[in-house]
Amino acid sequence: MKKIITLFIFFISFNINAQEKPKTQIVEASCGQCQFGMKGKGGCDLAVRIDGKTYFVDGTDINKHGDAHAADGFCSAIRKAEVTGEIKNGRFVATSFKLLPMEDKKDSHEGHNH
C-alpha cells in the first residue's frame, strides 16, 4: 500500500510541475490604449487579450513589430500573435512573441455561394 501512495504522490507532483511550463497560444494583440481601451499610462503600449482579459506586455515592445500607426499596425488593428509566457502581477510576461500575418477577408469567403 505504501508503494501505491508514494507512486500516486509522484504522479500528482509531476502533473503540477508540468503545468507550470508556459504554453504557446494564439492571442489577440494590439495597442492597449488605442484598441483595448486600457488605462494606466499615457502613450501607446503593446497589450494582449487572453480569455477576454487584457494585459500589458513585458518582454517585447510595440515598436519591435512594425509601425504601430500603419494601417495594419497595433494602434489601428487588432492582430493575432503566437505567444509564450505567463501572467505575473497583472501583466503578460512574454518569453516569445510572433506576430501572425493579417487574415485576408476576401480569401476567407472564396468558394462559398452566398
Image: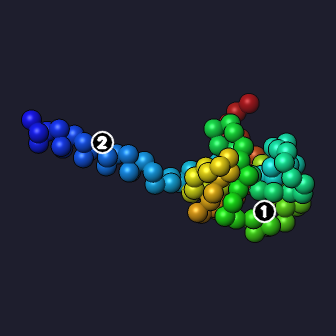
Residue 8 shown left or right of residue 96 in the figure: left
Q: In this view, does 14 lie above or below 63?
A: above
Picture quadrant of residue 9 = top left
Residue holding disc 2? 12
Kind of residue indicated by mark 1:
Ile
Image position, residue 2 (x, y; %): 11, 39
> Residue 88 got which mark?
none
Residue holding disc 1? 62
Image point (84%, 48%), residue name:
40
Residue most extreme to the front: 2
Q: In this view, does 24 lie above or below 39?
A: below
Q: Can residue 97 be seen in this view?
A: yes
Image position, residue 82 (x, y; %): 61, 56
Q: Residues within 10 Å of mark 1 (few under 14, many from 20)?
A: many
Image position, residue 66 (x, y; %): 79, 67
Picture quadrant of residue 114 = top right
Q: Which of marks 1 and 2 is in front?
A: 2
What separation in Å lies between label 1 and label 2 (alpha carbons)? 40 Å
Kind of residue indicated by mark 2:
Ile
Image point (78%, 62%), residue name:
62
| Picture quarter with the N terminus | top left
SS state under label 2: helix
SS state under label 1: loop
Image point (85%, 45%), residue name:
39
Residue 45 shown left or right of residue 109 in the figure: right
